[in-house]
Amino acid sequence: MSDDSHLVGRLEAIAEELAERAIAVLRDAVEAGETARPDEERRLSRARRAVEKAAAILSGTEPG
């Protein structure tokens, strides 16, 4: 496995962890009766998208 492939795998795992955390934050908000999207979930989602983009750049599958 090349260094880039290893990094891509790690980034993909981090993106998955961020997604799981964001879902947990949303679930907690719903259970608490909140009606607005939590700021923490927004930050986690932004971070996940950034990490996914980094993985795509390293793997050569960046759109465009």
Image: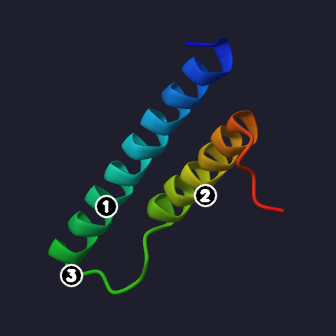
Residue 45 relative to residue 34: left or right: right
Rendered residue at 29%/80% (across/down)? 34
Count residues near mark 2 (Cα–Cα under 10 Å), then give few for <14, some for 14-19, many for 20+: few
Name the element at disc 2. helix
Q: Mark 1 or 3 closer to N-term?
A: 1
Rendered residue at 43%/77% (across/down)? 37
Q: Which mark is residue 23?
A: 1
Locate residue 29, reporting x and y percent.
27, 70
> Mark 3: which amino acid?
Gly
Q: How far apart are labels 2 and 1 at the CA level?
A: 13 Å
Q: Mark 2 or 1 closer to N-term?
A: 1
Question: Going by the picture, which residue comes out furthest to the bottom?
Answer: 35
> Mark 2: which amino acid?
Arg
Q: Which mark is residue 48?
A: none
Q: Is residue 28 above or below residue 37?
A: above
Between residue 18 and residue 63, name the one nearer to us. 63
Question: Going by the picture, which residue comes out furthest to the front?
Answer: 1
Rendered residue at 60%/23% (across/down)? 5
Locate residue 35, reporting x and y percent.
33, 87
Decide: marks 1, 3 in contact (CB < 8 A)?
no
Decide: marks 3, 2 in contact (CB < 8 A)?
no
Q: Which residue, given by chain and number where applicable, does mark 2 sit on?
A: 46
Q: Which mark is residue 33?
A: 3
Residue 34 relative to residue 49: left or right: left
Rendered residue at 68%/49% (across/down)? 53
Q: Which quadrant: the N terminus?
A: top right
Q: How far apart are labels 1 and 3 at the CA level?
A: 15 Å
Q: Is residue 32 above or below residue 56?
A: below
> Mark 1: which amino acid?
Ile
Q: Mark 3 or 2 closer to N-term?
A: 3
Name the element at disc 3. loop
Locate residue 6, reporting x and y percent.
55, 18
